[in-house]
């Protein structure tokens, strides 16, 4: 059987370089490799609403932002099905049946859910009618790992390119698949996560050196940033606080500029921008010895980032002038996704024996029983 990809993002903001090296760049490569039978890329608006119930406008506005980021990065609607989660209602029905196969206790142990409960400030001990300050955990939010299992299995996905924060979700999906297949017979496909190739891509830090790029920390470089914005952000980037004078030996580990180079720089960039060095290893060695200033390294990073982002900017300029087409791609993609999900849903209903009207044998059997045959 052919390999199938399903992955996606919540439309809560523009995508940044963390998204790019964590998954988006890989999706484009996989798309162009021709290795996959089908590729589904989902804008997870329904999931975004699980903790933004009071802010549907934010989700609505960001759908086109994320779609522009996808298209600009090189996802091609001719080769990948780009769609909007809420426009595929089959996903809700699948999630509803999977809910019977997962315990509250298992959801409570999901590390991503746990971390997000902390981050969102939901109070685990809130009581009914509690004040705004102690808001409880929305049921839809609590159960979103189950909805994510529906997203993945609806398309019989074998492969989910995503960051390591999604690992507990894939694990939970595999458990649901296992349980479903053992209770109702082989029906669903067990997916595998495809993680980024190196540590820098796995968790690209913010420009301030903090663990993660995050809009609320204001430490992101966006795919839609101009060359000037990128330059300013890189120039202000966190490096090694003990590397005060050029002659001082510097540290490469935990030095954000080098982490970004790990994620973006290739040997051929040196020939082009810094021919005194053959590779990133040589540059690092010099920095460690001392005698290499931050500005020189930052200039290289600016050149590399802008070289990466230039074709993305160019495609964005085109699609920004063709927004009606962007919505049309999403509409067609959603229809196509819906047809695929409906097939899986039919399999699921058959396996669960809730396909009453499609089951002639059932009707004949019941008729015979009541005629006392
Ligand atoms: N949880 C993902 C995020 O926060 C979005 C998402 C929803 C997803 N369903 C998915 C990712 C299925 C991979 C597979 O961005």
Image: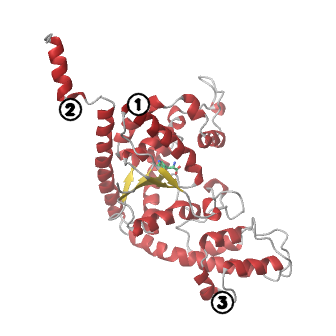
User: Which residue is found at the position 50% from the left and 64% from the top?
Assistant: 26
- Depth check: 200 or 360 in front? 360
Q: Quadrant for the N terminus, please.
A: bottom left
Identify the secondary structure beneath mark 2. helix
Q: Which mark is residue 183?
A: 1
The x and y percentages for residue 309 are 53, 73
Using a 10 Å C-alpha cutoff, classify the residue at mark 3 as few (fewer than 14 neighbours), some (14 to 19) or many (20 or more): few
Q: Quadrant of residue 79?
A: bottom left
Q: Residues within 10 Å of mark 1 (few under 14, many from 20)?
A: few
Q: Is residue 56 left or right of residue 126?
A: left
Q: Residue at x 29, y 34 (%)?
A: 350
Residue closer to the observer: 202 or 129: 202
Q: Nearer the viewer, mark 1 or mark 2?
A: 1
How far apart are labels 2 and 3 at the CA level?
69 Å
- Which of the two discs, 1 and 2, labels the residue nearer the N terminus? 1
The answer to whether the beta carbon of the residue marked 2 is less than 8 Å from any atom of ligand 1 is: no
Observer-side mark, 3 or 1, equals 1
Q: Residues within 10 Å of mark 2 (few under 14, many from 20)?
A: few
Q: Viewer-proximal residue, 74 or 161?
A: 161
- Residue 15 can be seen in this image: no
Q: Is residue 29 visible?
A: yes
Looking at the rendered structure, the secondary structure element under dot 1 is helix
Question: Where 334 sits versus 258, above or below?
Answer: above
Disc assigned to residue 358: 2
Read off the residue under disc 3. Answer: 275
Residue 292 vertical position relative to residue 190 in the rendered view, above or below: below
Query: Could you tell me how far apart the alpha carbons at marks 1 and 2 are, in whole angstroms?
Result: 21 Å
Distance between the alpha carbons at the discs numbered 3 and 1: 62 Å
């Amino acid at each position: 059987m052919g390999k199938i990809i399903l992955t996606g993002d919540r439309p809560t903001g523009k995508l940044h370089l963390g998204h790019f090296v964590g998954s988006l760049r890989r999706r484009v490569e996989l798309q162009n490799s021709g290795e996959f039978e089908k590729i589904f890329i989902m804008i997870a608006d329904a999931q975004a609403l699980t903790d933004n119930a009071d802010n549907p406008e934010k989700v609505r506005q960001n759908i086109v932002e994320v779609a522009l980021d996808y298209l600009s990065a090189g996802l091609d609607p001719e080769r990948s099905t780009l769609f909007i989660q809420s426009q595929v209602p089959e996903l809700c029905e699948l999630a509803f049946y999977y809910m019977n196969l997962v315990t509250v206790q298992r959801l409570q142990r999901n590390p991503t859910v746990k971390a997000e409960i902390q981050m969102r400030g939901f109070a685990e001990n809130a009581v009914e009618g509690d004040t705004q300050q102690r808001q409880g955990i929305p049921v839809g939010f609590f159960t979103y790992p189950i909805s994510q299992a529906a997203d993945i299995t609806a398309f019989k996905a074998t492969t989910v390119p995503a960051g390591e924060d999604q690992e507990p979700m894939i694990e939970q999906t595999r458990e649901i698949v296992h349980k479903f297949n053992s209770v109702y017979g082989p029906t669903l496909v067990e997916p595998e996560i495809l993680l980024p190739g190196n540590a820098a891509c796995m968790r690209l830090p913010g420009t301030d050196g903090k663990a993660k790029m995050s809009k609320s920390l204001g430490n992101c470089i966006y795919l839609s940033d101009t060359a000037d914005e990128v330059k300013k952000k890189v120039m202000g980037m966190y490096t090694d606080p003990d590397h005060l004078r050029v002659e001082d030996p510097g540290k490469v580990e935990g030095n954000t500029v080098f982490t970004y180079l790990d994620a973006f720089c290739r040997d051929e960039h040196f020939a082009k921008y810094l021919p005194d060095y053959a590779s990133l290893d040589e540059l690092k060695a010099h920095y460690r010895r001392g005698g290499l200033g931050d500005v020189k390294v930052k200039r290289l990073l600016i050149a590399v980032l802008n070289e990466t982002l230039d074709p993305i900017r160019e495609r964005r300029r085109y699609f920004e002038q063709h927004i009606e087409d962007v919505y049309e791609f999403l509409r067609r993609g959603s229809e196509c996704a819906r047809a695929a999900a409906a097939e899986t849903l039919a399999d699921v209903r058959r396996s669960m024996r809730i396909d009453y009207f499609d089951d002639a044998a059932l009707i004949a059997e019941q008729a015979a029983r009541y005629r006392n045959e």
